[in-house]
Each structure stands twice: as C-alpha cells, then as structure tokens.
Amino acid sequence: MSNRLAGRVIVVTGAGGLLGKEHSTAIINEGGIVVMVDVNMQPLRIFYESLPVELQKRCHISECDITNEKEVEALLNSLLDQDLHPSGLVNNAAINPSVEKNTSRFTRLENLSIRDWDFEISVGLTGALICSRVFGIYMVENKITGSIVNISSDHGLISPNQSLYAIPGIAPEKQSVKPVTYSVIKHAIIGLTKYLATYWATDGVRVNSLCPGGVLNGQPEEFLAKFNLEVPMNRAALPTEFRGALIFMLSEESSYMTGSTVVVDGGRSIW
C-alpha cells in the first residue's frame, strides 16, 4: 500500500460484481474510503464481512438503483450526512452477458426485444450519466479536485468475434451471440467520457475511460483456448490486473490526463 488515495472518498457502482470488488479492493489498499454501490446488497455484505476490521472502517456499502436519479441524489446526501465527501467515481455497473455467467442474455439481433435494449442501456449508460452528473456537479460546485473513471471494455473499441461463442452442430442463424447492447454501451461510454472531460476540463474534474480485456472467471477450457488465440499475450487477464491502471487514473499521478482511454487487454484490440 502506498496511500495514493489516502482519505479520498471514491464511489464504485456495480460493486458487487467481479471487477467491482477488485476496483474496491484496490481503492482500500491505497488508503481510500470506498463506497460500494449495487442494486443487490448480498454480494456487498459478503465482501464487507470478508474484510479485516481495520479495513471495514474504510468501506461503506449502499443499495442504490443508479437508473433512478432520486436514489443517486439520496445516496450523495446520505454520504454528506456522514461527513463523507466524494472526490472520485468509478462507473462500473453494466449488464455483461458472458459465457461463464448469463448466456441467457446472448440474444441475436433478430430476437432482441426493445425492452431488453432499454433495460441494458439504462444500467450501463444512463446510470453512468446520472452518477456522473450527480457526483460530478457536486465536485464542481464544491471546488473538489476529482476523478471519474468510466469502465468501458475492449468491446468499446472492437466488435465481438462471434465465432468465439459458436457451438458445433448448431446452424449459424441459431448460434448464440454477444448481444449488440453490450458493444453499443461500451462504445458510448467512451463518447460520454470525452464529452464530460471537455465539459469539466477547467473545473477540476477529470474524466477518463478504462477498457479491460477478457478476465479469467471460470470460463470453459474450450472457450479460453479460442480466446487466447485472439490475444497477443495469449491469455486472459487475472481479475487483479486492472488495479494499477485504475489507481493511476483516480490519483493525482494522472493529474494532466482527461478524456483519455486506457486499454488493458493484453493487446487484443491491436490485432
């Protein structure tokens, strides 16, 4: 621990997920105070109870629907009531259909319902806008030097290779695919980042995007064998391998960086 975030209050959305917990751990390990936010409290409680008592003091968990602006505003007011003044935000929440988790959302374009489209965009994009607006405006109005990190993806830079998800013996028109929603949202997150970066460029709030690549999380071996061939480093990331980039982006070490996209994908997007 080098205390690069000592005393700073950082809000992490979608904190109950795999990378949400990694982002939160990185912040705590650098001396920061993390506010873990999710619509589902169970994984937050499990994470909190797993921490040593001395680290629990720097971890706050909160249930919040980030698609509801009134709930996000109430979250901010609750933090201020506890004398917690946010100077950082990690917009991490998203619906991520994946081979190890929720292939039920692997919906072909022809079958995608507008209801699902609206829901996934509300979580992954509208939620990021709402949180950025609520916490960003608070920082600007209170002259707090702040940093917002929007979590995009290598799929915010490239289209998914649908052959990775192909199942032998199934007709091409019936194969499961990574849905269009995920790619659109992750591309749009980078656009939102650039807009907010210029909007608050002289107000002390920096906004940048982090694009993680594929992460090891119990995927089938046959999937990983195909995936590794797409990555110059010939492997998926460990969940811990984004911590350094995140802390750099949140800390004053990146004080002259805004509107940038940091890619940590083993080189996948350059092929």
Image (cartoon, helix red, strand yellow):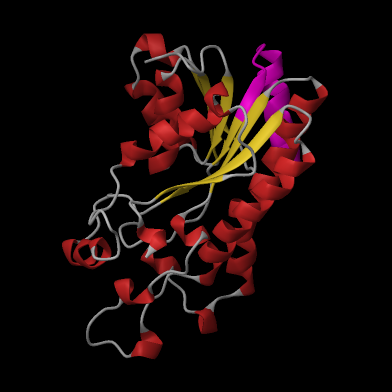
Q: Residue 21 lies in what quarter of the image? A: top left
Q: Is residue 137 left or right of residue 175?
A: right
Image quadrant in which the N terminus is located? top left
Q: Residue 202: percent from the left, percent from the top?
A: 78, 31
Which residue is at the front of the view, 61 or 213? 213
Residue 73 on the magenta segment:
yes
Q: Residue 208 lies in what quarter of the image? A: top right
Q: Residue 11: percent from the left, percent from the top?
A: 58, 29
Q: Is residue 62 above or below residue 261?
A: above
Count every numbered label the image shows and give the total: 0
Q: Which residues are magenta?
A: 69-88
Residue 24 visible within the image: yes
Chief secondary structure of the magenta portion: helix
Image quadrant in which the C terminus is located? bottom left
Q: Residue at x 25, y 53 (%)?
A: 233
Q: Residue at x 61, y 53 (%)?
A: 189
Which residue is at the front of the view, 20 or 194? 194
Q: Is residue 178 above or below residue 4?
A: below
Q: Is residue 166 left or right of residue 82?
A: left
Q: Residue 159: percent from the left, percent from the top?
A: 47, 69
Residue 62 visible within the image: no
The residue most toward the right is 141
Q: Is residue 61 above or below residue 128?
A: above
Residue 243 on the magenta segment:
no
Q: Residue 227: percent from the left, percent from the top?
A: 27, 64
The residue most toward the top is 54
Q: Residue at x 55, y 12 (%)?
A: 7
